[in-house]
């Protein structure tokens, strides 16, 4: 399976200038190729192939006066930018034809130098890992990396990223073997919420850290300072970076907490079942800020790829399943309940239920039934289909491995 490992990198002044050139050149190639395809489509001409765009917008463009600076950066970064454009078009066409599941994907858009995130992607021909712990990037130099852990295998591709607050990161994609954990006899159903982030079927409650809510006071002050600065001024740019850094701290804390909580759940249980919530719909309600602060989608994605990595069972229960309406003791369906009802008594057996704990137990029972049915498309209590649960690796990327050859990149230690 493919995994991604991110590391903080600290380029010096000359390397930052070289990376800025690389970001800009990759962006120009993307925009030029996208413009050619849009013009061809508007004129009713055939779809412009990648080979033709590579010849016109990279090879020949380097010999023109207006694009001669494309030769100052690695050609691999320019070719990968064109490949990324092809991938964006493929995702768009597959979405139109119904071949791609999930949300509809729009057509590729132009990139701007004012975008908060700049990146280039390289294959093994344009980077290598050195013995002294640095990473050599073509036309940039040896970058100093903060190694937090070892790479388990040789990477197949590298993405260099600059975020909105000016931090640089290296993102390695590699093919890793599953790291199987000892088999356990326990399983867990999880009910996600806002008052408590998660309630497990065994009664444990994970409190919601509310990182954004805790940082709101400082964020409000920084946003007020930003709004007072004149547009286009250097002081406004400095104030914008302060706001971006504070948002980055919130996101980093939330991501770190998600990783720790999901890892603990996967280590403690052989099977994990969660409800497939409509987060995008909940994000448009009055609870939007709290929903986004909780980060349910990111947490469930971590559970999913870690279950696949460690040999655990993972399944999603359809959101139409009435987990809050059914008594987990006798199975009697007691009808819908308002959100403020946190405890209720079953009208059939008289059992007093905590709403979240009861829902987690029902998610556990339904998840067991889905797994027992072989994850085939079955019907839940409401008659809605429960689709088979897929177990992809997190943030997969095709990479650029050379068939029949092994990469010569070394694997440094921390």
Image (cartoon, rainbow, N blue to C red):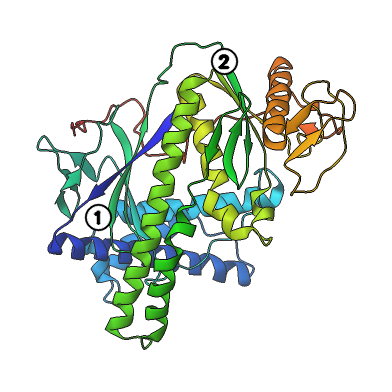
Which residue has dot 2 on it? 186
Res 227 → quadrant: bottom left
Q: At 71% from the left edge and 15% from the top edge, which residue is drawn?
A: 372
Q: What numbered label is drawn on residue 74?
A: 1
Badge 1, how many Cα within 10 Å: few under 14, some, many 20+? some
Res 153 → quadrant: top left
Question: Circle 1 — which element?
Answer: loop
Residue 162 vs residue 337: left or right?
A: left
Residue 156 vs residue 397: left or right?
A: left
Res 371 → quadrant: top right
Residue 133 vs residue 352: left or right?
A: left
Please state which of residues 123 and 282 is positioned toward the viewer in this rendering: 282
Q: Is residue 6 above or below residue 72?
A: above
Q: What numbered label is drawn on residue 276?
A: none
| Outermost right residue | 348
Looking at the picture, how far across and down is residue 179, in whole percent?
40, 20
């Amino acid at each position: 399976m493919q995994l991604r490992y991110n590391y903080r990198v600290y380029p010096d002044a000359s390397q930052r200038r070289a990376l800025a050139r690389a970001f800009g050149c990759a962006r120009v190639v993307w925009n030029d190729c996208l413009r050619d395809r849009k013009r061809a489509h508007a004129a009713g001409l055939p779809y412009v192939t990648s080979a033709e765009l590579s010849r016109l917008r990279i090879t020949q463009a380097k010999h023109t006066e207006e694009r001669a600076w494309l030769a100052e950066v690695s050609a691999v970064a320019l070719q990968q930018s064109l490949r990324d454009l092809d991938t964006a078009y493929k995702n768009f066409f597959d979405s139109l034809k119904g071949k791609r599941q999930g949300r509809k994907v729009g057509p590729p858009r132009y990139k701007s130098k004012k975008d908060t995130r700049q990146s280039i992607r390289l294959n093994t021909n344009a980077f290598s890992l050195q013995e002294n712990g640095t990473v050599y990037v073509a036309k940039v130099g040896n970058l100093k990396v903060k190694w937090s852990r070892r790479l388990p295998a040789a990477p197949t591709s590298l993405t260099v990223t600059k975020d909105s607050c000016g931090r640089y990161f290296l993102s390695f994609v590699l093919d890793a073997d599953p790291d199987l954990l000892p088999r356990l006899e326990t399983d867990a159903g999880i009910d996600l919420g806002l008052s408590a982030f998660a309630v497990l079927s065994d009664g444990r409650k994970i409190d919601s850290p509310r990182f954004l809510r805790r940082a709101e006071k400082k964020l409000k002050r920084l946003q007020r300072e930003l709004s007072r600065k004149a547009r286009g001024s250097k002081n406004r740019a400095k104030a914008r970076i302060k706001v971006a850094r504070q948002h980055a701290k919130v996101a980093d804390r939330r991501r770190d907490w998600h990783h720790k909580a999901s890892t603990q759940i996967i280590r403690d249980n052989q099977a994990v079942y969660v409800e497939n919530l409509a987060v995008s719909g909940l994000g448009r309600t009055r609870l939007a800020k709290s929903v986004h602060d909780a980060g349910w989608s990111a947490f469930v994605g971590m559970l999913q790829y870690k279950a696949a990595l460690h040999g655990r069972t993972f399944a999603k229960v359809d959101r139409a399943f009435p987990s809050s309406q059914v008594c987990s003791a006798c199975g009697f369906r007691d009808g819908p309940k308002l959100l403020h009802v946190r405890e209720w008594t079953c009208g059939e057996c008289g059992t007093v239920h905590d709403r979240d704990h009861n829902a987690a137990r029902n998610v556990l029972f339904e998840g067991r039934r889905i797994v027992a049915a072989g994850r085939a498309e079955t019907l839940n209590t409401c008659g809605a289909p429960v689709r088979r649960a897929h177990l992809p690796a997190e943030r997969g990327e095709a990479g650029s491995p050379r068939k029949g050859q092994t990469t010569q990149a070394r694997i440094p230690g921390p």
